Image (cartoon, rainbow, N blue to C red):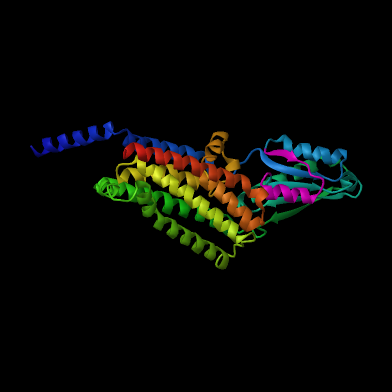
């Protein structure tokens, strides 16, 4: 008798799960998505890395070296500035992460003097990526040297000079401090906001609040404001710890950094409100937040893995992740002392995201509580 009741209960629970499409999506969709994302993003390989080349020699051998670097498909030449000031501008704008400088009289120094130098310059705001690019370029230049060495002649020597801009010591904190700020703000503002409003709806107290004299929009703003303040304080704490414990500099304008931090907070807040309008329980809100906010913020924002190393479809997918743009802003302001010309585009994208999310959240809110 007891066994029969037990199997009836198991059957009922199974039917209940199978009828809930959201639960099925979480149970099967999330593992599949995570396996695919981890499988493609956890890699040290790269391709089509954007590079700039200054060819001060303009001879046959220097042109052969440029062709050798780009022939493998790992490097993609997108700029040939006339001087190092052009490279600095490209680095600040974020259009390139790596540069090669070929000095004058490269061919003569290589064949007659038996010694020539090539300078490699990398953007070290992403230390692992910069190290990978530098190591691979060094290997390719070594192979190029062996190919052009004449048999029976004295060995040719091609010296390589490497510079790591913005992070010469390759400190990992320079990368993870901006990422941690973006992750914390997203968790507090988006996830906690969605859970709080979902709790009110689940317990039925939201209906009582909505019949109060206050307009619904003010009720929502009143409930989420403490999370904005707490998240902003958390961001300040992380910045202070980064500066005084991990020696991460803030070279740019602190006011601009904090202002754009507030903009990102509002985007995360709008995401949380939107999730809450689509969630009826705290569990649904939590799982939706984790799947749509937490994991993408960690994996597709450039926080843990370079976006350039991901397949094309994941790179396109990362364009809808707000943290990607905020991390770029943080690195540009904190590490590069970049001006508006380098951060206006990611800032504009965050503004557009904020407007779209606010419109969507307000529309859903009206539908639910009309």
Taking the spot 55% from the left edge, 63% from the top edge, the residue there is 242
Magenta segment: 74-95
Q: Which quadrant: the C terminus? A: top left
Could you say where residue 50 lies in the image, as x and y percent from the top left? 68, 41
Query: Is residue 138 visible in this depiction of the protein?
Result: no
What residue occupies the far front of the structure in this picture? Answer: 213
Q: How many marks?
A: 0
Query: Is residue 270 visible in this depiction of the protein?
Result: yes
Could you say where residue 102 lies in the image, as x and y percent from the top left? 82, 47
83 sits left or right of 300 in the view: right
Taking the spot 59% from the left edge, 62% from the top edge, the residue there is 248
Taking the spot 19% from the left edge, 36% from the top edge, the residue there is 10
Q: Quadrant of residue 74?
A: top right
Q: Quadrant of residue 68?
A: top right
Could you say where residue 30 lies in the image, as x and y percent from the top left? 40, 39
Q: Which quadrant: the N terminus? A: top left
- Which is nearer the eye, 143 or 252? 252
Could you say where residue 250 lies in the image, as x and y percent from the top left? 61, 61
The reply to whether the magenta stretch includes residue 292 is: no
What residue occupies the far left of the structure in this picture? Answer: 1
249 sits left or right of 61 in the view: left
Taking the spot 79% from the left edge, 51% from the top edge, the residue there is 84
192 sits left or right of 131 in the view: left
């Amino acid at each position: 008798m007891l066994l029969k009741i037990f199997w009836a209960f198991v059957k009922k629970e199974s039917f209940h799960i199978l009828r809930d499409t959201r639960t099925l999506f979480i149970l099967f969709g999330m593992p599949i998505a995570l396996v695919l994302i981890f499988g493609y993003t956890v890699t040290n390989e790269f391709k089509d890395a954007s590079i700039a080349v200054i060819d001060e020699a303009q001879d046959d051998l220097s042109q052969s070296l440029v062709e050798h670097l780009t022939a493998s498909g790992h490097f993609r030449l997108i700029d040939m500035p006339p001087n190092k000031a052009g490279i600095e501008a490209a680095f600040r704008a974020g259009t390139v992460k790596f540069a090669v400088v070929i000095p004058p009289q490269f061919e003569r120094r290589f064949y007659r003097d038996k010694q020539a130098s090539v300078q490699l310059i990398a953007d070290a705001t992403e230390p692992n990526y910069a190290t990978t690019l530098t190591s691979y370029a060094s290997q390719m230049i070594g192979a190029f040297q062996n190919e052009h060495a004449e048999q029976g002649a004295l060995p040719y020597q091609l010296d390589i000079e490497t510079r790591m801009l913005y992070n010469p010591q390759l400190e990992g904190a320079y990368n993870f401090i901006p990422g941690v700020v973006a992750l914390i703000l997203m968790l507090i503002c988006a996830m906690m906001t969605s859970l709080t409003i979902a709790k009110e709806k689940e317990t039925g107290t939201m209906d009582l609040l909505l019949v109060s004299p206050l307009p619904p929009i003010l009720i929502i703003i009143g409930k989420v404001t403490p999370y904005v303040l707490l998240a902003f304080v958390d961001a300040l704490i992380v910045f202070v710890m980064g500066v005084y414990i991990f020696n991460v500099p803030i070279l740019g304008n602190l006011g601009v950094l904090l202002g754009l931090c507030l903009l990102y907070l509002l985007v995360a807040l709008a995401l949380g409100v939107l999730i809450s309008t689509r969630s009826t329980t705290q569990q649904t809100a939590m799982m939706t937040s984790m799947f749509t906010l937490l994991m993408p913020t960690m994996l597709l924002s450039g926080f843990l893995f370079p976006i350039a190393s991901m397949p094309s479809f994941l790179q396109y997918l990362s364009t809808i992740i707000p943290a990607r743009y905020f991390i770029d802003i943080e690195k540009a302001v904190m590490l590069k002392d970049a001006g508006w010309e380098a951060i206006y585009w990611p800032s504009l994208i965050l503004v557009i995201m904020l407007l779209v999310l606010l419109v969507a959240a307000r529309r859903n809110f009206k539908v639910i509580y009309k």
